[in-house]
Image (tube, rainbow, N blue to C red):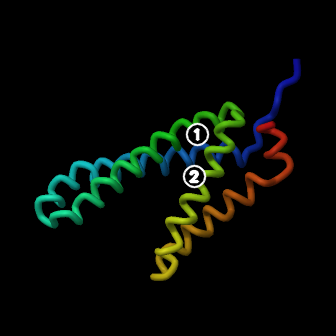
Amino acid sequence: MSTRVRPTGVTILAVLMGGVSLWWLMTAAFYFFGGFFFIFALGFLGVFAWMYGILLGFLGLIGLGASGGLMQGSHQAYGFTKIIAVIGLLFSIPALLNGVGVVGAIIYILVLFYLSRPGVKAFFA
């Protein structure tokens, strides 16, 4: 019986993913429940806030599952983490136009780079 040794970067990535996912869930609750107020205050534009809250909640739940899967070495969690990193990178593009999303974009690029390393791929194989 051979045991796989989890790379230290995977542990750090799983903890960061869990923290970001919790942040997404808190933000989702704000937009979801606050979206009802926005619907009354802003009319139809408030629906977008409500839908954004649903999207963030969905990503937060997937991210929590993926962070637990990363700790276990799950191949599905590896794929979900790559998908979430690409989605996060796409969401940071509009923020890049304002100069605000530079840190987020760099982090998502580093996550994608790290997940493409041969040792990390072998751990999740």
Q: Relative to 81, does residue 113 appear above or below in the rendering?
A: below
Residue type at mark 2?
Ile
Q: Residue at x 67, y 57 (%)?
A: 111
Residue at the image point whose x is 71% and y is 34% from the top: 73
Percent across and percent down for residue 5 are: 80, 34
Residue at x 58%, y 40% (from the top left corner): 67
| Disc 2, SS | helix
Is the residue under label 2 in contact with that under label 1 (CB below 8 Å)? Answer: yes
Q: Is 62 or 8 nearer to us in this picture? A: 62
Q: Does dot 1 land on a helix, a strand or a loop?
A: helix
Mark 1 residue type: Ala
Q: Is residue 115 left or right of residue 106?
A: right
- Quadrant containing the C terminus is top right
Residue 22: name its quadrant: top left
Give whichever of 120, 31 is nearer the camera.
31
Q: Could you give the CA–CA distance between mark 1 and mark 2, rounded to whole angstroms?
A: 9 Å
Residue placed furthest toward the top: 1
- Taking the image as shown, residue 3 lies to the left or right of residue 81, namely right
Q: Residue furthest front?
A: 44
Residue 108 percent location from the top left of the image: 61, 62
Q: Which mark is residue 66?
A: 1
Query: Which residue is at 73% across, 45% downward?
Result: 8
The local crowd at label 1, few if under 14, some if 14 to 19, many if 20 or more residues have their Cα within 10 Å, is: many
Locate residue 47, reporting x and y percent.
Answer: 25, 58
Q: Residue 82 got which mark?
A: none
Residue 84 - label: 2
Instruction: Give the mark, 1 or 2, whose residue is nearer the N terminus.
Output: 1
In the image, residue 92 above or below residue 48? below
Residue 68 vertical placement versus 116 (above, below): above
Task: Say whether residue 8 is left or right of residue 94.
Answer: right
Q: Quadrant of the N terminus?
A: top right
User: Dot 2: few (<14), some (14–19), or many (≥20) neighbours within 10 Å?
Assistant: some
